Image: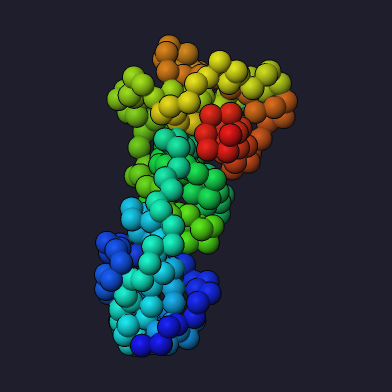
Amino acid sequence: MSNGKTTAKIRLFVEHPLAQGQSVPLDRDQAHYLFGVMRLASGDGVLLFNGRDGEFLANVEDAGKRGGSLICAERTRPLQPPPDLWLLFAPIKKARTDFIVEKAAEMGAARICPVQTDFTNSERIRRDRLQAHAVEAAEQCGGTFVPDVTDLTRLSAMLDQWPSDRRLMFCDEERAGEGLGLRDAAPGPWAILIGPEGGFSAGERTRLAAMPQAVPVSLGPRILRADTAAVAAITVWQQALGDWR
Ligand code: SAH
């Protein structure tokens, strides 16, 4: 085996455990991508991560048409998990939902939860497709962690089981124009809640107002679209309480 390319640029997410000397089997799609599309040959280097073990330089051991394997050399980065932040959002049109998942994965959410609210108009999501977007975002942005995308759940059901120690940054369009509202907040387990195009219902507002974990915030004087609001909310949270401090 040759030493491979020393400047491995390709980053690939795999499910397999990673450790120095570990051989990692490739499925058909991965083999097609590495050997068919990217034209890697035996000995060439790739960066691998699995969301748990950090990032490893790996060299092509066996390049086949329908499969193959890589062998891990040294670990190039430790696992860098994001802060304990969940993003709850009401799914909107497909391209905008994809955008929210991609941006949340890039910006450092630990878990992404599509929620069905009273005024959510999109009833179905493809969880596996959204999860694949989160994987792609992590591959592209140098992340070593991939947030879980959960199944679409009713917001009311989530609030019924809400953990007592997890605060909820309730992005409330009715507070547009007030101050942000995070001044007294402390780091720890948090979630951000973004509503759908129609905003939150009166029932949801009453429910959230009664939750001691809920912290209502304003995202400025203008009403933002839900996808913009998600990016803005993660930004202000990361800056105030997360790993951008
Ligand atoms: N139809 C609603 C707007 C919904 S905007 C209306 O006209 O009032 C979609 C979501 O983005 C909102 O539910 C809220 O979670 C968030 N959002 C948008 N602008 C906001 C702001 N200025 N402050 C707080 N949250 C905001």
Q: Answer above or below: position of 101 versus 137.
A: above
The residue under the point 28% across, 71% down is 21
Task: Give the number of callouts.
Answer: 0
> Can you give x and y, in whole percent of width and height, for residue 59 in the image?
38, 78
Q: In which quarter of the image is the C terminus?
A: top right
The residue under the point 44% across, 77% down is 45
**Nearer to us in this view, 65 or 160:** 65
Asked if one can make out residue 94 in the rendered structure from this viewpoint, the answer is no
The residue under the point 56% across, 15% down is 184
**For residue 25, side relative to residue 76 (left or right):** left
Asked if one can make out residue 242 in the rendered structure from this viewpoint, the answer is yes
Which color scheme did the rendering employ for the protein? Answer: rainbow
Q: Answer above or below: position of 128 versus 80.
A: below
**For residue 227, side relative to residue 223 (left or right):** left
**Nearer to us in this view, 23 or 85:** 23
> Can you give x and y, in whole percent of width and height, for residue 202 in the image?
50, 18
Q: Answer above or below: position of 174 versus 8.
A: above
Quadrant of res 218: top right
Q: In which quarter of the image is the N terminus?
A: bottom left
Quadrant of res 208: top left
> Can you give x and y, in whole percent of width and height, for residue 142 in the image?
51, 58
The residue under the point 72% across, 29% down is 222
